[in-house]
Amino acid sequence: KAEAPKAAAPVAKPSAPAAEKPKAAAKPPAKADAPPTAEATVRVDTKRLDDIMNMVGELVLVRNRLVRLGLKSDDESMQKAVSNLDVVTADLQSSVMKTRMQPIKKVFGRFPRVVRDLARSLKKEINLELRGEETDLDKNLVEALADPLVHLVRNAVDHGVEMPDDREASGKARVGVVVLAAEQEGDHILLSIEDDGGGMDADVLRNKAVEKGMMDQDAADRLTDNECYNLIFAPGFSTKDVISDVSGRGVGMDVVKTKITQLNGTLNIDSSLGKGTRIEIKVPLTLAIMPTLMVMLKDQAFAFPLVSVNEIFHLDLSQTNVVDGQEVIVVRDKAIPLFHLKRWLVKGEAHSKVDESAHVLVVSIGNQRAGFVVDQLIGQEEVVIKPLGAMLHGTAGISGATITGDGRIALILDVPSMLQHYSARQLTAA
């Protein structure tokens, strides 16, 4: 009988959960909302994205082949299917590229501190403005652009913006402004570094080039102001007489140019004395697939990166001449060096005669322009860059290989490297 009250206690316990049931019923909606939030993003290894991009690249090559075959076919249904495949492949390529994209603010984020510390050490007052931080580009490009941008921003702070007292004396605000901006232009990204500093004096740059033995006075006098500004990207070129920890050794700017060229990008510079300088960098959205201009040299196909091609015209031998042992062609009253690619790149053609039906491709590398004679133009084609095998790796003037729409293997030309290697050798031989 004494244990009867103990037996009653367990009977009361079930009533507690029963009373709590309404609370338990209120929780499921919160739990139901949680899974979609958890599944909104998935971690993916970068290597897997690279593998997918490579497979899309292979698909682009197959697409190019089918498009070429479709053009030769009279079957309308086949042409329509190939056209649909072309559209779907382009959409897939775009979607996969987007998965590799990152906002450039990952790089931009470091610059406020870089500018602040550098301005303090130089006793300058500078505001940094960042624009277009949400602009997306390929992850590999984001990482590759970090160092060149640091060089250019440091150069703007050191060389561009004047000391506060000097700015005040010239009627400017004591605080200088450096603007770092990014925006998308079609399938390229445009980056700009602009300052409201003293700008560059083209005559000072001309004199410095002569003083350093880079050219004679006549050649310097013929340079346009824009060509003078581009001299700052020449190796060892510096206008500072005092070497500091920041600059003055003439190293850095040529490294920037080399790096941007390796990324199939271009550098442009514009300056106004007393008002400031603007440097623009244009790079492709991705490094995996490259727009090229396909050409033929005898029976071999080669690909020029389209970004470096300025213009194309038929070869007119009456406009050619030889100056100091170098063949030149006159384009709009200006002589530019002319090179016969077949003599450089095709075996047994070192002394071949000029074909009057040939074409000239004018390319730009920084402030330099050159003309290349090619036998035949095939047309524009997007290509997937394949690395060279062990036997060809390191070959001057060749950056990779690809498969063309008609199944040929084409070598992709590295224009700056090719000019540096072959033109120097040609002039030595002359």
Image (cartoon, rainbow, N blue to C red):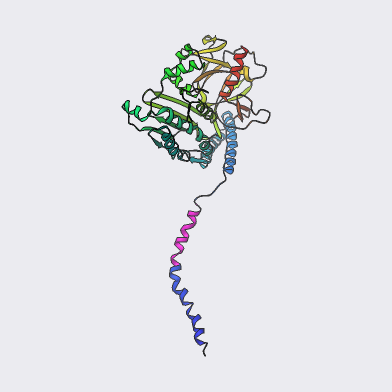
Rendered-image quadrant of the C terminus? top right
Q: Nearer the viewer, residue 60 or 418?
A: 418
Relative vertical location of residue 119 with respect to residue 209 in this rendering, above or below: below
**Percent position of residue 372, x then y:** 56, 18
Residue at 51% across, 87% down: 4
**Percent position of residue 266, x then y:** 49, 27
Report how many numbered discs are placed on residues in the image: 0
Which region is colored magenta? 25-39
Q: Nearer the viewer, residue 230 or 297?
A: 230
Magenta-drawn stretch contains 300: no
Q: Does residue 187 show up?
A: no
Q: Nearer the viewer, residue 240 or 301?
A: 240
Relative vertical location of residue 211 with respect to residue 102 in this rendering, above or below: above
Q: Main secondary structure of the magenta part?
A: helix
**Percent position of residue 240, x then y:** 46, 24
Residue at 64% across, 20% down: 346
Magenta-drawn stretch contains 32: yes
- Where residue 60 sits, quadrant-wise, is top right
Relative vertical location of residue 240 with respect to residue 217 in this rendering, above or below: below
**Percent position of residue 408, x then y:** 63, 28
Task: Tell which residue pokes out farthest to the right in this image.
Answer: 391
Relative vertical location of residue 340 with respect to residue 30 in this rendering, above or below: above
